[in-house]
Amino acid sequence: MTKPEVPTVVPKAKGGRVLIGALVVGALLVGVLVGWFLPHAEKVAVQNVVNLSQSNAQLVISAEGLKTSVVNLNHSSAHPPAPRTVLAQFPAAGTLVAKGSRVQLNVYLSTVAVPWVVGQSASAAISSLQRAGLRARYLSDHTFNSAAPGIIFAQNHGAGEVVAGGTLVIIYANS
């Protein structure tokens, strides 16, 4: 004689259907809200800033309500661009993005060797530094008495030190 089959009954957890229903309604509500607000976020076209200076490019991008991030690159070419020039941007010009989005600027960062200017007149030292692509600040100092007035006796970056183009080099002379 065979045993009659007994149907298996799975006990229902109290509130199980209510919990599942609440999760489904919650997921639908989130989907509706995201679907409603995201497509309606204000979009702007990314402006073309390639070949602009980094500072001008950042002004153009921020005027559109966008943010920037900068990646510094070295450029190997017989004709390198001016230091701090935007070589590329991502996303590309014309791309529609939500206001507040970030635009990456790939910027040419030149490097130069600092020239030795100690012993030169202040005007000659400033000219040498500017020709090398550096900025110069002249400070007079009354404490170094053995140097002739107006002759550079110290600089804050050593000769041959490799620095980014546009770096400020402070030069010191007796007054």
Image (tube, helix red, strand yellow):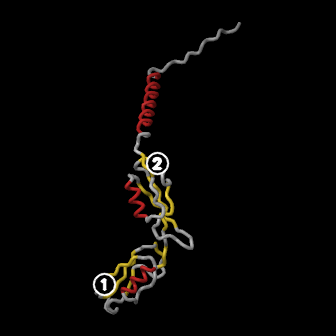
Instruction: Tell me: residue 166, above or below residue 143.
Output: above
Q: How crowded is mark 2: few (under 14 residues within 10 Å), some or many (20 or more)?
A: some
Q: Point out residue 95 in the picture as x, y percentages from the top left corner.
A: 48, 50
Residue 59: numbered disc? none
How busy is the neighbourhood of tag 1: few (under 14 within 10 Å), some, or many (20 plus)? some
Point out the image quarter for the C terminus. bottom left
Labelled pair 2, 1 in contact (Cβ < 8 Å)? no
State the residue at coordinates (48%, 21%).
Answer: 13
- Name the kind of residue labelled 2 in the image: Leu
Q: Is mark 2 on a helix, strand or loop?
A: strand
Disc 1 secondary structure class: strand
Give left or right: position of 10 versus 41.
Answer: right
- Please tell me the numbered disc located at residue 140: 1
How far across and down, in percent of the image, does residue 109 sit? Answer: 48, 68
Q: Residue furthest top?
A: 1
Label 2, on which residue? 96
**Residue furthest to the right:** 1
Query: Which of the 4 image quarters holds residue 61?
Result: bottom left
Task: Classify 8 as above or below 102.
Answer: above
Image location (x, y in percent) of residue 140: 30, 84
Instruction: Report the mark closest to the observer, 2 or 1.
Output: 2
Residue located 65% across and 9% down the image:
4
